């Protein structure tokens, strides 16, 4: 039964993760680590924090579902 549901979980988490990454703010990534000037560190609050956390959760779900698929 898990083998029939797992592909849907993988595809669903991949699509949701793509949407979550596209919804995040531009320039909030690794630019500061490579000497980009004019940017300053701000803490994520509200929707941005929830979106960031959900992206991490979706990535973990995606990776775990792929690993489980390999062993089935």
Image (spheres, rainbow, N blue to C red):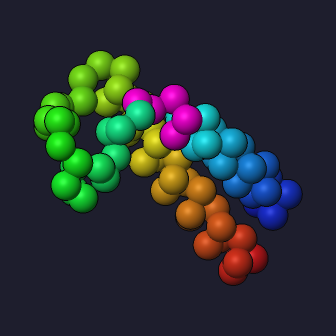
Q: How many marks?
A: 0
The one nearer the camera, 66 or 27, is 27
Using the rendered image of the protein, determine whether residue 9 is visible from the camera's viewpoint.
no
| Magenta segment includes 57 | no
Q: Would residue 17 appear left or right of 71 to someone viewing this image?
A: left
Residue 18, position in %: x, y?
A: 61, 42
Residue 31, position in %: x, y?
A: 29, 50
Q: Identify whether 40 is placed above or below 45.
A: below
Magenta stretch prevailing secondary structure: helix
| Residue under the image location 63 percent in, 62 percent down | 65
Dividing the picture into quadrants, the one containing residue 40 is top left
The one nearer the camera, 30 or 47, is 30
Q: Identify whether 27 is placed above or below 1.
A: above
| Residue under the image location 58 percent in, 43 percent down | 17
Residue 60, position in %: x, y?
A: 49, 56
Dividing the picture into quadrants, the one containing residue 63 is bottom right
| Residue under the image location 52 percent in, 40 percent down | 21
The one nearer the camera, 24 or 63, is 24
**Highlighted magenta segment, given as a residue range:** 21-25
Question: Which quadrant is home to the N terminus?
Answer: bottom right
Q: Would residue 14 appear left or right of 2 to someone viewing this image?
A: left
Using the rendered image of the protein, determine whether residue 59 is visible from the camera's viewpoint.
yes
User: Which residue lies most toward the front here?
Assistant: 37
Q: Identify whether 69 is placed above or below 5.
A: below
| Residue under the image location 61 percent in, 72 percent down | 67
User: Which residue lies most toward the top here?
Assistant: 46
């Amino acid at each position: 039964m898990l083998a029939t549901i797992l592909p849907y979980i993988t595809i669903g988490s991949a699509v949701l993760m793509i949407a979550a990454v596209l919804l995040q703010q531009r320039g909030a990534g690794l630019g500061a680590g490579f000497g980009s000037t004019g940017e300053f560190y701000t803490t994520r609050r509200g929707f941005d924090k929830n979106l960031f956390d959900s992206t991490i959760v979706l990535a973990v779900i995606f990776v775990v579902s792929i690993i489980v698929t390999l062993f089935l």
